Image (tube, rainbow, N blue to C red):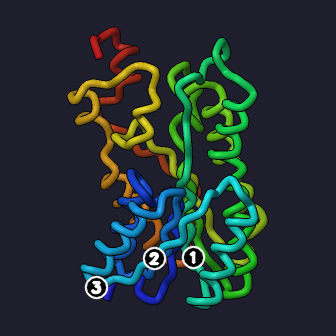
Amino acid sequence: MGKLSGQVAWVTGAGSGIGEAAALALAEEGATLVVTGRRKEPLQSLAARIQANGGTAEVEAADLTDASAIDGVVKRTAEKFGRIDILVNNAGVNIQERSWGKLSSSGIDALVQGNLTSAFNCARAVLPVMRAQGGGQMIHTSSMSGRNIGPMAGPGYIAAKHAVVAMSHSINVEECINNIRSTAFCPGEVNTPILKNRPNPLSDEDLARMLQPEHCGDMIRYIACLAPGVTMNEVWLTPTWNRGYVAALGRKL
């Protein structure tokens, strides 16, 4: 039996990248998975892989910028499984027209709603379930852009991800008395589909040196498997060949 046998984990943004890797890692530890994203087809493929390895996975496709859709997923999950032990709050977006000179009001809305409002509403929706069952754990995918200011990610993404870190810590402040734990997960560059929205394309060598989704999945698994009385408030995970450090050294990227 895995360390998470008997637990139910809801993973958002599970159709690819970090969310997909997290779902697979948690399933390996015996958790029952509920996977959410906008596109149903990759979620069904992910669920089939989990089920083929003897796991349990439920597909709940939803647009997480819609609070009512989030509430529906949580309601159906709680009704079917009776609990939600782990929330991997991972869904996020970025856009190409991201600098101050190019940002539009619709772009700002997309960044804030896709990275912050959706995360807030997922946390809000699961809290009553976790309180009622006597505890739970949330792992929120922020970013190193949620801890550092720089030109690469764009001001909207940076601001939203900083707010995700603050949101996570605020959950620990209020909910520790309910045995609810929250972790702000801040990865550096990860080779995921969101990189396709970078204004400047990256080389295969750049992508190979980055964190890979499975590295993040392993970290999320580690956090989820911590003893119930232990909280990892925040964790940074970066590639050894850190492009920001290399640039600061004056080396060619």
Front-most of 198 and 22? 198
Q: CA distance from mark 3 to mark 2?
A: 12 Å
Which residue is label 2 attached to?
Answer: 33
Mark 1 and mark 3 lie on one chain; the one further toward the N terminus is 3
- The quarter of the rendered structure image containing the N terminus is bottom left
- Residue at x-position 52% and y-position 51%: 185
- Residue 113 location in percent, x, y? 70, 45
The disc placed on residue 54 is: 3
Front-most of 196 and 23? 196
Q: Is residue 81 above or below residue 159?
A: below
Quadrant in which residue 192 is drawn: top left
Question: Decide: marks 3, 2 in contact (CB < 8 A)?
Answer: no
Residue at the limit of the structure toward the top, as seen here: 250
- Residue at x-position 28% and y-position 33%: 207
Three-letter amino acid code at disc 3? Answer: Gly
Q: Residues within 10 Å of mark 1 (few under 14, many from 20)?
A: few
Which residue is label 1 attached to?
Answer: 229
Which element is circle 3 on?
Answer: loop
Mark 3 and mark 2 lie on one chain; the one further toward the N terminus is 2
- Residue 223 location in percent, x, y? 46, 65
The disc placed on residue 41 is: none
Front-most of 190 and 111? 111
